[in-house]
Image (tube, rainbow, N blue to C red):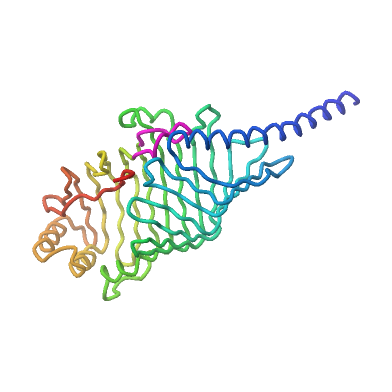
Amino acid sequence: MRIIVILLTVAAVLFLGWWFVAVWLLDRGLDRSAEALRARGWTVAYETERVGGFPYRFDLRLRDVALSDPAGALAWQTPELRLDALSYRPNRVLAFFAPGQTVTLPRQTIDIVADDLRGDIRVGFAPQVPLTSLTLDSGPLRAASSLGWEISAAEGLAALRLAPDETQQEAPESGVLYDAYAQLDDLALPPVLAERLDPEGALPDRLAEVSLDARLGLDQALDRGMTAWPQVRSIELRGLEVDWGAVTIAGSGDLLLDDAGIPEGELVLRIGGWQQLIDLAEEAGLLTGGSARMVRGAASAMADGDAIEAPITFEGGAMRLGFVPLGPAPRLFVPPGG
C-alpha cells in the first residue's frame, strides 16, 4: 500500500511539473513561431496574458491580434482570442473568438460580427506542426464589405480536414488535399443583389440553406513552414446544395485552377424551378434577349419536368451551358495581390 501511495505521489508531482514545463514551452513556442513568420515577411502582432488553467488545462488569452501575409493582400484582425487546450492533449485547441473580426482581401475589407464564434483546431505531432483539422461554427452572423455589400445568416459552419493518406497521391503537382465543408442557414443576400435578382419578390427574401462539400488541392501544406497563403489548384465538388424556395440547385464536378484562379473543367448542376431562374436572370440583365432565348432553348432540351441537369463547361477562360456561351469564367480564388 505504501508503494502505491509513493507511486501516486510521484505521478502527481510529475504531472504538475509537466504543466509548468509545458507553459514555458508554450510561451517560448509562440514567440518563436511569431518571429519565424516575421522573418519571412509576415506581420504578426498580439498581446498576451499569463497562461491559466492549472493543472488540467492551458488557457491563453491574446489581445489585439493582427496577422497579415507578406504581400499585405490578406489579413485578419480581432480584439481578443481565447485558446484552451487540455494539458494531456495539447494538440487539440479550442478557440473562442470575440464577436468582431476584420478580414482584409484584395480590394476589399470585410467586417464580421458573429455570436458565439468558436473553433476546434487539431494539429499533428511533427516539427512542422501540420494542421489536421479545423472546424468553425457560429450563431447569428453578419458580414459587411467596404465595397458596400452585406450578408447575414442564422447559423454558419465551416470545416477543413487533411484528406486521408491514401488519397494524397491524387493531389496536383505535389500539393496537399484537404476535405472542406461549409454551410449557411437562413442566408440573406445583399439587398442590392436581391433587388437585382428578384425585384418583384417572387422568391423568399432568404435562402433556407446553402452548403458545399468539396475536396481541395492546395499547392502547399497548412503548417508552420508556409511562406505565403496556399493557393487552391483543384476542386472536386462532391456536393453543392442551394434551397431558395421554388428554386433549388444541386451540383458536382471537377475543376483545375490556373495561377490566376481561372477554372478549367466541368460542373453538372441539377436545377429545380429553372424557368423561374432564367426569368429572374433575364429581368436582372444577366441574360440579354438573344442569350436568354438560347439558354431557355438549351434548358428545355435538357429538362425533366421542372428540373434540368445542366453541364457547365469551363474552358479557355470562358464558360458555356452545352453549346451556349455564358460569358467569361469567374476567378474562383484571387491570388494575393491579384
Residue 256: in sight, yes or no?
no
9 left or right, relative to 334 = right
> Residue 35, percent across and down?
52, 35
Residue 116 or residue 82, whichever sits in front: 82
Give the side of residue 155 with respect to residue 278, left or right: right
Q: In this view, does 313 lie above or below 247?
A: above
Prevailing secondary structure class for the magenta stretch in the rendered image: loop
Residue displayed at 26% across by 52% down: 269
72 relative position to 285: left or right: right
View extreme (left): residue: 290
For the N terminus, the image quarter is top right
Residue 126 versus residue 272 in the image, above or below: above
Residue range highlighted in magenta: 218-231
> What residue lies at 71% left-to-right and 44% top-to-bottom?
53
- Residue 293 lies left or right of residue 273; in this view the side is left
Based on the picture, tell me whether residue 225 belongs to the magenta stretch.
yes
Q: Which residue lies furthest to the top in this view?
A: 3
Give whichever of 128, 171 is nearer the camera: 128
Compared with 142, 174 (above or below) is: above
Name above or below for residue 242 compared with residue 9: below
Q: Quadrant of residue 149?
A: bottom left
Q: Disc count in the image? A: 0
The spot of residue 201 in percent (x, y) is 30, 75
Coordinates of residue 91 in the picture (x, y in percent): 58, 36
